[in-house]
Amino acid sequence: MCKKYSRIFSIIGILFVVISFLINPFTIQQTIIPDGNLQDINKIYFVYILEFLLFCFGIYIYLKSKKLLKKEVSIQIIMFISFIMACVLFLEYTSFLGGTIFLGKDYFKPAHGLIMKNIWIMDKDRDLGYVPKKNDVRHAIKAYPNGKTIFDVTYTTDIYGRRIINQPNSLNNKHIILFGCSFAFGEGLNDQDTFQYYIQRLMPGYFVYNYAVSGYGPQQMLAVLESKRLPQEVQSTSGIGVYVLFEPNSIARLIGSTEIPWGYEFPYYTLDKNQEIMRKENFFSDKTPLTYLYSTYSDLRNKSAFLQLLNINFPLTIKEKDVFLFYKLIEKSKKLYEEQFDGTFYVLIHPLTEYSNDVVKLICLLVDHHIPILQYPLDPTSKEYRIVGDGHPNGKVNQLLSEYMARVFAKVNNPK
């Protein structure tokens, strides 16, 4: 290669390397995506692959132009890359074949081939990540691949996006404000089977405001309380605040994880140097590199039979500081609720919660710091208390749990 062309190719190689650094999720988010939300790109991992290929190609051209790369080395590099690609293809093929044979032909389809309509219809929200559509009536359906129904229900929301169940209200009623995830929202249930319905029926002196939303973590509760909008949205000034805690998954939603790919725009809380709760924006904006890696891994796993069979999530373990963060978030939520209302804040450990070491540590922290806990023990592994084919609690467990709550609060109000 003559010097003239050698110089041209070395410049081209450098340009490819520079371009590879420019073509990355961070610059794309700022320059191409109008709303700054890279999650809208379904195949985000292609950005990383393109970046990697451009970088390798640029380095290769540059080294060749400088005669720093011998022919034998070039062949070895090509053979190595080909070997890696062959291994990946082999793993994918055998994983898909084995999974299809032993786990069923629908295993690698979205949600294992289940038919789902109108399950998640949300509006984006800068503060909370997403919120239910306001004044909405949604017909949600979930069914097996053969068409057999798992649930066929209707959700109705009010002007604030809260689930409503046509419960009677009175100016003299106190309130019960529910916070939590799909277990408190009533995922997969019609009105008459929800926790919300049974509570208002068994405690007629209270009106239930349901701020729980499917997929939420505990941070949405604190974000709502920090907004100080509840006194304007809740009719009564006295009552009860209840956070319905279900684990596994709640801690993962709080710290950001590959388990919750829908939650990367959730509020992000951390602890300052004084071990006090501090609000940042969301995982994408404040844990950017790590969150993009999690997002890319989640997207890759959805398209990889091998990764789906491995079913590994990151971070691999929950740390003690994560459990402590959870406790501090609840502590602050309790403080804000009781500043804004004449009432008491409780943590209700959902009876289908698995009592892992992390949950036990969290409960100990709550008890040690005098945060009231409600516990109604049931066998979390029993199918008797779950919607068949779904896993969310059914009407039976909601009825039992509401009866327990009604008894507890009857004793609180009438201690004799």
Image: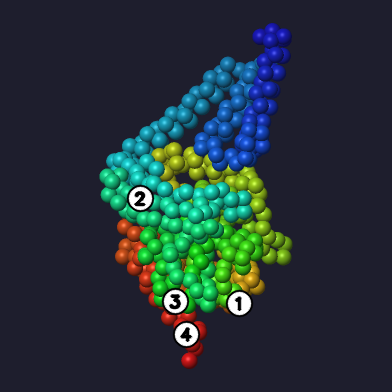
Give me the C-alpha separation between circle 4 and circle 2: 40 Å
Evaluate whether residue 6 shows in this view.
Answer: yes
Identified by mark 4, the residue type is Lys
Question: Is residue 335 among what the camera can see?
Answer: no
Can you name the residue that lies furthest to the bottom here? 416
Q: Of residues 60 and 368, which is closer to you in this image? A: 368
State how the image is colored: rainbow
Mark carried by residue 342: 1
Look at the numbered disc 1 and give the secondary structure of its residue.
strand
Quadrant where the N terminus is found in the figure: top right
Badge 3 vs badge 2, beta-carbon distance below 8 Å: no
- The amino acid pointed to by label 2 is Lys
Residue 222 locus on image (x, y percent)? 60, 63
Q: Name the residue beneath numbered marker 4.
A: 411
Which residue bears the numbered disc 3? 203
Residue ID for mark 2: 142
Q: Residue at x 36, y 38 (%)?
A: 96
The location of residue 359, given as percent across then percent down, is 50, 66
C-alpha gap between disc 4 and disc 3: 13 Å
State how far apart marks 1 and 3 are (Cα).
18 Å
Q: Residues within 10 Å of mark 2 (few under 14, many from 20)?
A: many
Residue at position x 68%, y 22% in the image: 15
- Mark 2 element type: strand
